[in-house]
Image: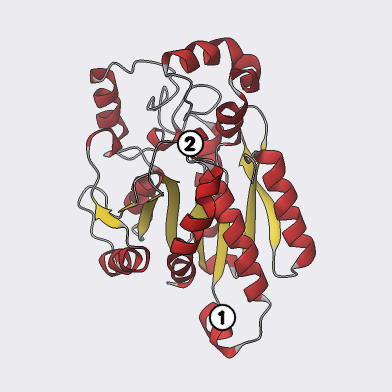
Amino acid sequence: MNQYGCAALWKELRRLEQDFPAVRVFRAGRSVLGKEIPAVGMGCLRNAVLLVGAVHGEEWLTARLLARFAGEIAAAWTDDAPSFAGLSRGKGLIIVPMLNPDGVEIALEGPRAAGPFREQAERLYRENGGKWQANARGVDLNHNFDAGWPVLRAMEIEAGITGPAAARYGGPYPHSEPETRSILNLICAFRPRRLYAFHSQGEEIYWEYDGIRVPHADSIARALASLSGYTLVRNAGLASHGGLKDWFIQECRRPGFTIEIGKGENPLPPEDLEPIYGRLLPMLTAAAFL
C-alpha cells in the first residue's frame, strides 16, 4: 500500500458510494488551501456516531484505517441479517477520515504542497526535522478548539511555541482555522451521540476532560480498552486542552475519545495498517453502535 493523500481518499469513498446504496458521501467543509474535506454517512445521521481521522498531517494512516472500516461497515449495512439489523436500527455513522488534508499533503510531499504558505512551511519544516502535524498555516488543529484554550496557549508560550509551527501551535484564537470550524459545524448540525478522534501513536485511549462527568463515558472507555488492548490514560501537559474530544465533552456533554493507534514513530509505515486494523476491528465495530 502506498502513501495516502486526499485525492486517493475521495476516489475510494466515491467508489463506496457507487457500490453501496447505504453510503452517502458529502463535503464536511474546506481546508485553508480550499481542499474539500470528505465525509461519509450511513444510516440515521441524526442519531450517529462520529469518527474523525488525520487531524494531524503525519497521522495519515488513521485516514486509511477509517476508510477501510467505512468499506467494511458499508457492506454490512446492506446485510439483512437480524443481528446487524438490530444493532443498526435507528442509528447512524458519520466518518470524516481526513480532517486536515493540507497537512497530510505537506507530510507526504513536503512544503511545496503548502501553496502560498510554502516559504513559511519550508522554514518550519526544517526547524521540526522534516516532520509536519499542523495545517497549511502552521496551526495544530488539535490545539485550536475552545476547550481550555487560554490555559493551553500559556503552556505553549512557556514551551517556546509563540507562532506558526509544524506542530503544537494552537493558532491566534480558538476556532481560527476552517478545518476546525468545519468539524464543529458538522457536529452542531448532526449532534452525534459519540465522538471518536483517531490519532497515532501509543496504543492509548484518552476518555475524559477537565473532570466533567459524562453519562456512560467510563463504561464505554473500559469496553474500548478491553476490545483493543489499549491503555486508558488521562490528559497531561500540552495534551491537556484544546483538542476536538475536549471540546465535544465540554460542549455536548456526551462521551468523546481520542484513540492513539499503533506504536512507533510518526508517520507510521503503511505496512502497519493491516495488523492495526485487525486488532482494532472489534473495537471499531462496537464503537459504531455503542
For the residues labelled 1 and 2, the Cα–Cα distance comes to 37 Å
Residue at image x 48%, y 26%? 132
The quarter holding residue 201 reads: top left
When the figure is inspected, residue 129 is found, relative to residue 37, above or below; the finding is above
Instruction: Give residue 200's position: percent from left, percent from top.
Output: 42, 44
Instruction: Give residue 207's position: percent from left, percent from top.
Output: 30, 55
When the figure is inspected, residue 180 is found, relative to residue 215, above or below; the finding is above
When the figure is inspected, residue 179 is found, relative to residue 162, above or below; the finding is below
- Mark 1 and mark 2 lie on one chain; the one further toward the N terminus is 1
Badge 2 is on which residue?
267
At numbered mark 2, what does the secondary structure look like: helix, strand or loop? loop
Q: Around disc 1, counting alpha carbons within 10 Å, would you say few (fewer than 14), some (14 to 19), or many (20 or more)? A: few
Q: Amino acid at mark 1?
A: Arg
Badge 1 is on which residue?
89
Which residue appears farthest toward the front when viewing the image?
A: 271
Task: Return the mark for residue 151.
Answer: none
At numbered mark 1, what does the secondary structure look like: helix, strand or loop? loop
The quarter holding residue 122 reads: top right
Quadrant, the C terminus = bottom left
Residue at image x 73%, y 60%? 16
Q: Is residue 188 visible?
A: no
Q: Nearer the viewer, mark 1 or mark 2?
A: 2
Q: Amino acid at mark 2?
A: Pro
153 or 63: which is nearer to us? 63
Which residue appears farthest toward the right when viewing the image?
A: 18
Along the horizontal axis of the image, is 38 left or right of 100? right
Residue at image x 50%, y 49%? 272
